[in-house]
Amino acid sequence: MLNHRLRRLWVITHRWLGLTVGLLFVIIGLTGSLLVFHHTIDEWLNPQLLLSAESDAPHSVDEVLEAAELSVTEPGLQLFFADPPRSSAGVWTVWFRNTEDQEAGFTQVYVDPSTARVTGQRVWGEYLVTWLYSLHYKLLSGRSGEIIVGLCGLILMFSVASGIYLWWPLWRHCWRAAFAIRSGRRFQYDLHKSTGVIAAVLLLVISFSGVYMIFPAWIRPCVLAVLDDGQPRSENKKSTAVTAGNRIDVSRATAIAQSVFPEAEFKRVKLPSQLKDSFEVRLRQPGEVRKSSGNSRVWIDQFSGEVLSVRDWNERSAADAFFAWQFPLHNGEAFGLVGRWIVFVSGLMPAVLYVTGLLVWWRRRRTRRSQVTPSLKLQEST
């Protein structure tokens, strides 16, 4: 009797979590699926902006940054960091932040590496792919939207767990019945059940990684309580301030970083904005799970060129590895193109589960109403 009541409670909880929050699961899942291939989509929509002719003699990063700075006329914009081309046919992306308006999005200037010609500029958040990002991780609603999305991730994890709990007795008694999809009136229910179970692990992993990225202040202390953290301290990254104007070239800074990791691929350089700041060069070594931007970093004194601090993926701590895996798991890049397609399909699953769950609930509700109506008529006639 107690088990029956407990199961009934889980059924009600699972049902109403889906009916009340399910539509948000669908929005977050579908936008996530699109964002798995956001670079490809963006390049397909804007080839004149994001693609260039291949060249054997590309311009230096200093020439690229100079061209980008000359093209910017809006006051208050400060050079922040730069990303090299993603492919041989790509362009540099140079990021400027607005020092006069902290709420303004980054201005991105695109520069052809073969000609140092600016192909155009955009503001982050004001074009399709970044709009999808904002919808995906904050529902276009700032920090309050981020919190809602993070809570949705927690609720989805609980909903998946409750679904597994309800499905488990079927598996124990007959695995064929547990995965069977029958036609007719049972089709929606069986499709909901089987889809949920098959996608459960992926949804749990993707949900957790999303929750981590929104609530790192909650999760990091818990992880660091049991795992060692080997990241360098912030005080080891400060430049020794000298007379302004003696800063080394960006090309030299990136070359110094490459000499630290000769086999690594250069992914990003963050420029110092104050005298105490240093160059931060991000690289990806062979074997790193974060393929898009890498996890190895080198901090370089902007005046002397001295290497101040290094984060080496090959000498990572357990905590470093745990944190580094979250984003690549979330978008699938950890496992290459196959991983991205798996995450793409996983993002469609909340829509399948929502629609099938809604149909099952509606059909049962209509059946109960049809059973109640004749009994009421019978009572009235007597």
Image (spheres, rainbow, N blue to C red):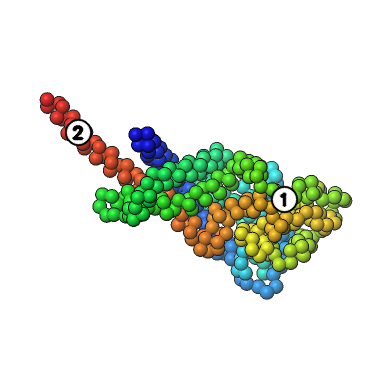
Q: Is residue 262 visible?
A: yes
Residue 230 got which mark? Answer: 1
Which kind of residue does numbered mark 1 sit on? Gly
Residue furthest out toward the bottom: 56
As drawn, is 282 to the left or to the right of 172? Answer: right
Task: Judge by depth and name the residue closer to the eye, 285 or 92.
Answer: 285
Residue furthest out toward the right: 243
Task: Judge by depth and name the residue closer to the eye, 42 or 123.
Answer: 42
Which kind of residue does numbered mark 2 sit on? Thr
**Which residue was labeled with disc 2?**
373
List x then y, in percent, for residue 382: 12, 25
Cα–Cα span, label 2 and label 1: 68 Å
Residue drawn where x is 17% and y is 34% of the image: 374
Residue drawn where x is 64% and y is 53% of the image: 321
- Camera-side mark, 2 or 1: 1
Label 1's element? loop
Residue drawn where x is 71% and y is 67% of the image: 263
As drawn, is 7 to the left or to the right of 260? Answer: left
List x then y, in percent, for residue 267: 67, 60
Q: Residue 223 lies in what quarter of the image?
A: top right
List x then y, in percent, for residue 136: 51, 48
Label 2's element? helix
